[in-house]
Image (tube, grey):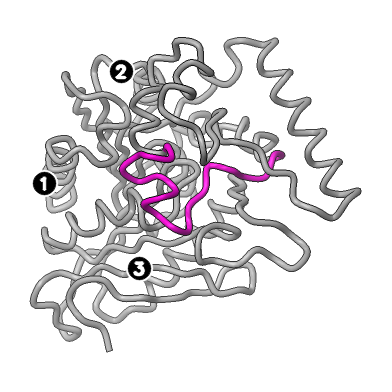
Amino acid sequence: MFKAGKNDVTFKSFGVDLAGDLYLPEGFDENKKYKAIVSASPFPQVKEQVMATYGVEMAQRGFVFLGFDYLGMGDSPALPGEFKPARYSFRIMENTWDAVSYLGTLPFVEEILGLGVCQGGATIASVAVTDHRIKKIALVSGMMAGDGFSWANKEMAQQTIAAANASRQKMYETGEPDLVPTFGMTDDQSREEFIEALGGNPMAGDSYDYYGRDGAFGPKAIKNFSNMTVGDQMMEALFSIGEHYADKIVQPTLVIYGKDTFTNICSIGFIDKLTNDPEVLAVPGFEHVDFYYKPDAVKMCADATTEFFNK
């Protein structure tokens, strides 16, 4: 029996049960029909982070909202013989297709929509190319056009590939996980240590304030989250699918991003390739990570997405 608020659910993907949270609006009635949102989160998040933040907000606005842990992340298992935490891009796309299938089994769901934040924007854009069960998509602070980041410095890209290749070989030979820190951040660093290690990266402080040991949604606050993940994931992450199929996306699309952010090229470059007359909201005054959890940024995104989805 479902109830208003958060409901623990599971659904099948790759033959195992993925763990999810299904957020339902106040006064929920199983005999009524609702618009449902399948969500996709930033790397390397679990469902208690951005998905939980937006799940509450969108349920308050009358939507059914599904947040879930991808295969090998959070409360979802890894496949036999594989390791956690592991967030492989192609698998999270398939997990998302299966999440759409799960929502399609719920008798109170009349329409399925997609909402992705950061890497989740790339995920939703990618799955929507060929999944027209998703009727509209909203992409927030999205890393859709990732080539400008991933491949602009070819020497650094080759170093990333070499490290990922070596990690994959090591795990194959040893049968043990090879865990590396996400974006150079460990679970034990202080804010000062991380900022110094990143050598002036403009997102370092904001990233720590969210993901760091002492951050609002870091490993001390979210018990099943870690900044450490298996080291071969960039072998998939360097492929940007949605960006290169943007002209094939037919669903109405809303893109929200910070006008002055370091990452805005990843939204702008994607918008330039769309052919479906997207709605665009370029917002001054917010940084990339603000859209994850800062109340003013989240409310603005939730309100704009609600208006767009209800048209």
Q: Position of residue 192 (x, y in %)?
A: 42, 22
Residue, x 71% and y 39% (percent of image)? 232
Is 226 one of the magenta-colored residues? yes
Residue 166 disc label: none
Alpha carbon of mark 2 to alpha carbon of mark 1: how far? Answer: 24 Å
C-alpha gap between disc 2 and disc 3: 31 Å
**Label 1, residues with CA under 10 Å away: few <14, some 14-19, many ≥20:** few
As displayed, is residue 133 above or below residue 280? below
Within-10-Å neighbours for mark 2: few <14, some 14–19, many 20+: some
Residue bearing the label numbered 3: 21
Disc 1 from disc 3: Cα separation: 24 Å
Indicate which disc, 2 or 1, sits on the residue closer to the N terminus.
2
Q: Quadrant of residue 103?
A: bottom left
Q: Residue at x 29, y 59 (%)?
A: 37
Amino acid type shown at disc 2: Thr
Location of residue 292 (image quadrant): top left
**Magenta-tinted stretch:** 212-232
Between 236 and 201, the one nearer to me in the picture: 201
* Residue 148 in view in this figure: no
- Please give left or right for residue 22 compared with residue 222 in the image: left
* Mark positioned earlier in the residue sequence (1 or 3): 3
Pick the quarter of the image with the N terminus.
bottom left
Q: Position of residue 237 (x, y in %)?
A: 60, 35
Q: Residues within 10 Å of mark 3 (few under 14, many from 20)?
A: many
Q: Is residue 50 left or right of residue 295?
A: right
Image coords of residue 14 (percent x, y): 63, 67
Q: Earlier in the sequence, mark 2 or mark 3?
A: 3
Q: Amino acid at mark 3?
A: Asp
The disc at residue 307 is 1
Question: Which image quarter: residue 94?
Answer: bottom right
The disc placed on residue 261 is: 2
Of tags 2 and 1, the one toward the viewer is: 2
